Amino acid sequence: MSVVASPAATHAPSPVKRDLSERALGTLLLTPAALLLLVIVVYPIATLFWNSLHGVDNANPAAGEQWVGLKNYLNAFEDERFWNSTLHTVLYILVTVPASLVVGLGLALLANLPFRVKWPVRLGLLLPWALPLVFAGLIFRWFFEYRTGVVNDVLMKFGAEPPQWLSDPTLAFIAICIAIIWKSSSFMALMLLAGLQTIPRSLYEAAEVDGASKWQQFVEITLPMLRPAIFVALIFRTITAIQTFDIPYAMTGGGPGESTETLAMYIHKTTLDFLDFGYGSALAALMFVLSMAATSGYLKYTRRSSGRER
Amino acid sequence: MFPIKHRAMVWIAGIIVVVNGFFPAVWILLTSLKTETELIRSPITYLPEAATLSNYATAFTAQPILRFMWNSFVVASLSTVLCVLVSALAAYALTRLRMPHRNLIMSVLLAVAMFPLISLMVPLFKVMRELGLLNTYLALILPYAVLSMPVCTLVMASFFQDIPPDLEAAAMVDGCSRVGALFRVVIPLSAPGVFTAAILAFVNAWDEFLLALTLLNRVNMRTLSVGITLYQGEFAFPWPLISAALIVAIVPICILIAVFQERVVGGLTAGGVKG
């Protein structure tokens, strides 16, 4: 919209025309983002569903990929490894999402105290966030090593029998969960800390006057006021937990056997190690549907709250 | 002043948070100074007995770690530039222009960009192979720009909103076009927001593993996050060497977040709380 072209301020464009040109400009400005999403997300996802309906016939591999209809999906439902890896993913979600919320809330409450020097605490929360997931996995793998790991050393100092963490299915699962909780709770804490800092001090002062205990203040003021931040943090965390890959990849590679393998890891193996694109695509499509459910929950929430704020 | 008991509590709280955040980094720093023989001693040692820098020397020769770092740097910085540019235009359209269905567009933008990477990885591999982009920087730059688009758009939108419309109107009266006003007034005034968005996009790209593992599989094209996993053998884990490599790999990102910590925290939470 060029202001220079209009002869005088008295001749300002009518609201309707102004809106139209703003709409045109807005569409133009949104085009790069839309194009990028189209090429990198929408088109690949569309081909994902298309590929999932194709497969290579093992009896006649020279023929290349053939239309197989829903066969890949039917195979998935009978594939024990698919169900097991899905079950592991769900278990990781059920254990690590609430646990990292609790740990993150604890860290946020501690970090919210009146420190005179703020940077060490802030860095203490930022470092786990900035550390690549796969590095965290490598480091925790080593903490849990049988002979040289620090976890077993501490256990022995307390007189406990050191277990073979990463060779036992249950213990390996626990070790991976601990690594995930450590890695994700700091980000939770940062989000919750921002929520804590928006709670007016006067609420606590009023409660103090009324003789409320610290615990009552926490339950009656902090938790209700923090609910939006907790909700957003939970959704974010769930979306990432569905995709759990890096940490188990680095710690156990899915082992022992396939006992800690997640759906994401199975999809990766199917596609890149077994080179079965059709089946891998079907699995990825199933995972896509799973995570869309979580995302739609998040969107419902943000649309409601942004509608309220603006 | 606080009572002494309260001050002690604050100290303890601070120590807990700091120890929780730093212990893995401190542990690998200590390990990186140990020798292989000291490592397998039982019981294990905590502080290195005869500190050595030889693991660092090996870290640079055993794998082309500087090359990994360069790859990560190129991919992360170019994807950051692309992401910030695209997100700035989108954020402007969504906050400063009278667009119909603004919230809906924002939601779609966020939803599309939140698709699970693993579902995207399978078809992207195929698309990139068909385009001949496997093992090129572009194969990661484009997806990484998308990866950070939601958070960058949210962060910049929250900054754009706070700029008084009068300033923009004044610039336009002085002969700026609307787009000119965006680049000469709105973006300079929201420089902290643009900068915050850039740091977040950079860290996201620097840390990503799955796509990097899949789309760049030639050794000299590996990024740092994937390259570090090459230090381990099939069954052998030379922990002092891996630790040294890890330290080299995390130092740049640590410096970045240490210098810009306030911005990073502000940016991370703007996406969640305001969104």
Image (tube, coloured by chain):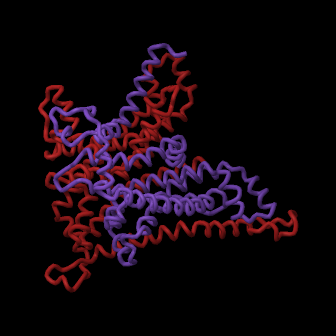
Q: Quadrant of residue A264?
A: bottom left
- Which chain's colour is red? A
Q: How many marks?
A: 0
Indicate whether B3 appears above or below A273. above
Position in image of residue B61 (x %, y %): 31, 55
Q: Which residue occupies the extreme left position in the image?
A: A161
Q: Residue at x 48, y 44 (%)?
A: B257
Say whether residue B116 is visible.
no
Give residue A80's position: percent from left, percent from top: 16, 60
Residue A118 to residue B70: above or below: above
Q: Position of residue A268 (x, y in %)?
A: 27, 63
Q: The chain coloured purple carries which letter?
A: B
Q: Could you say where residue A10 lies in the image, as x and y percent from the top left?
A: 87, 63
In the image, A4: left or right of B18? right
The residue lying at 31 percent from left, 43 percent from top is B53
Q: Residue at x 42, y 36 (%)?
A: A124
